[in-house]
């Protein structure tokens, strides 16, 4: 048996606690205090206090909260600051939402959607000096279906994390086979910024679909700029996969189903634009929204 403390935060942490509660698994939980994280992914974990013992932190540095944490057992980190345990001299298990060594670093989920990956994964590894580079102890593939969005993928990832935690609590850490990562296959990512989410209608319809869903909820959303206004697109789908249907960015149709836009090749149907019902889209057929 392994006594663990779960360090988690954000949307993924909320999903994970739901899955653990449903499975009857109740580890001690450490998360960040409400308002400490300045990110749209931050969540209020207070609704889990009846089922879990939760410790709230207002620091992302382990040395600053040793006394508050006390004895933690084996720390297991799911969507938690990657360098929190930088000075720790004991084993720490981290989770990552990809099949490491692919997609190390931040923005792994967005990058996999942007590239149109069909298979992602959940990896658990022992923390090392190299970010996301420690020995792997558990790994499972996760399907990314064509109609999936990040919220769907994170739900699958949370279930995989709950399965691992259940297995870990039933046996010692040493019972897991450790294997080093292949450094030659490692891919490191930079954190995605808002500017990276800008929609370029000169791309083909399929690439634009992947781009839009890559930044969709719980992330900050892909967007286009038109006449000085910013429009965030949460959902879309390729309407015509290839071919020339007019100037890229031209509005081809507006209906209850969405707003059809000409792409560099093919057309894309914008089905959810923040702040508008589809039929109330403020630009008419023939206008070009790709010219900011």
Image (cartoon, rainbow, N blue to C red):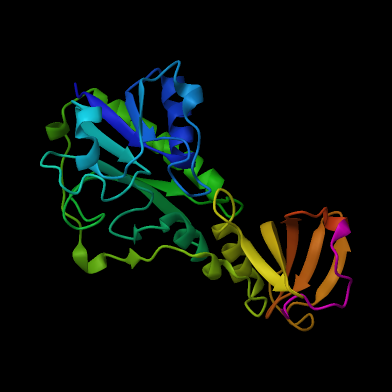
The quadrant of the image that shows the N terminus is: top left
Q: Visible in this render: residue 94? A: yes
Q: How many marks?
A: 0
x, y percentage for residue 275?
77, 54
User: Taken as a whole, is the magenta stretch helix, strand or loop?
Assistant: loop
- Residue 82 drawn in magenta: no
Residue at x 44%, y 21% (from the top left corner): 21
Left or right: 12 in relation to 195? left
Q: Is residue 234 above or below residue 138?
A: below
Q: Is residue 262 above or below residue 137?
A: below
Q: Visible in this render: residue 164? A: no
Q: Is residue 31 above or below residue 267?
A: above
- Magenta segment range? 280-292
Residue at x 35%, y 43% (from the top left corner): 80
Quarter assignment of residue 222: bottom right
x, y percentage for residue 50?
45, 15
x, y percentage for residue 113?
51, 59
């Amino acid at each position: 048996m392994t006594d663990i403390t779960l360090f988690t935060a954000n949307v993924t942490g909320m999903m994970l606690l739901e899955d653990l509660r449903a499975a009857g698994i109740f580890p001690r939980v450490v998360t960040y205090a409400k308002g400490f994280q300045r990110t749209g992914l931050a969540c209020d974990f207070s609704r889990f206090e009846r089922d879990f013992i939760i410790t709230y932190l207002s620091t992302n540095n382990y040395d600053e909260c040793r006394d508050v944490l006390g004895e933690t057992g084996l720390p297991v980190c799911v969507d938690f600051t990657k360098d929190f345990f930088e000075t720790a001299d004991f084993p720490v298990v981290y989770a990552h939402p990809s099949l490491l060594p692919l997609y190390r670093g931040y923005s792994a989920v967005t990058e996999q959607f942007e590239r149109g990956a069909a298979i992602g994964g959940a990896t658990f590894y022992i923390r090392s000096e190299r970010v996301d580079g420690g020995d792997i102890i558990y790994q499972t593939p996760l399907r990314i279906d064509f109609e999936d969005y990040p919220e769907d993928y994170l739900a699958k990832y949370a279930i995989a994390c709950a399965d691992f935690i259940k297995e870990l609590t039933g046996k010692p850490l040493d019972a897991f086979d450790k294997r080093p990562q292949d450094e030659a296959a490692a891919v490191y990512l930079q954190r995605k910024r808002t500017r990276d989410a800008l929609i370029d209608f000169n791309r083909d319809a399929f690439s634009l679909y992947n781009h839009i869903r890559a930044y969709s909820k719980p992330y900050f959303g892909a967007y286009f700029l038109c006449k000085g206004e910013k429009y965030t697109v949460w959902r879309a789908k390729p309407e015509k996969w290839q071919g020339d249907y007019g100037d890229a960015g031209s509005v081809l149709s507006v209906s209850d189903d969405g707003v059809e836009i000409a792409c560099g090749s093919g057309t894309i149907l914008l089905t959810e634009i923040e702040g508008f019902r589809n039929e109330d889209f403020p630009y008419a057929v023939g206008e070009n929204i790709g010219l900011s």
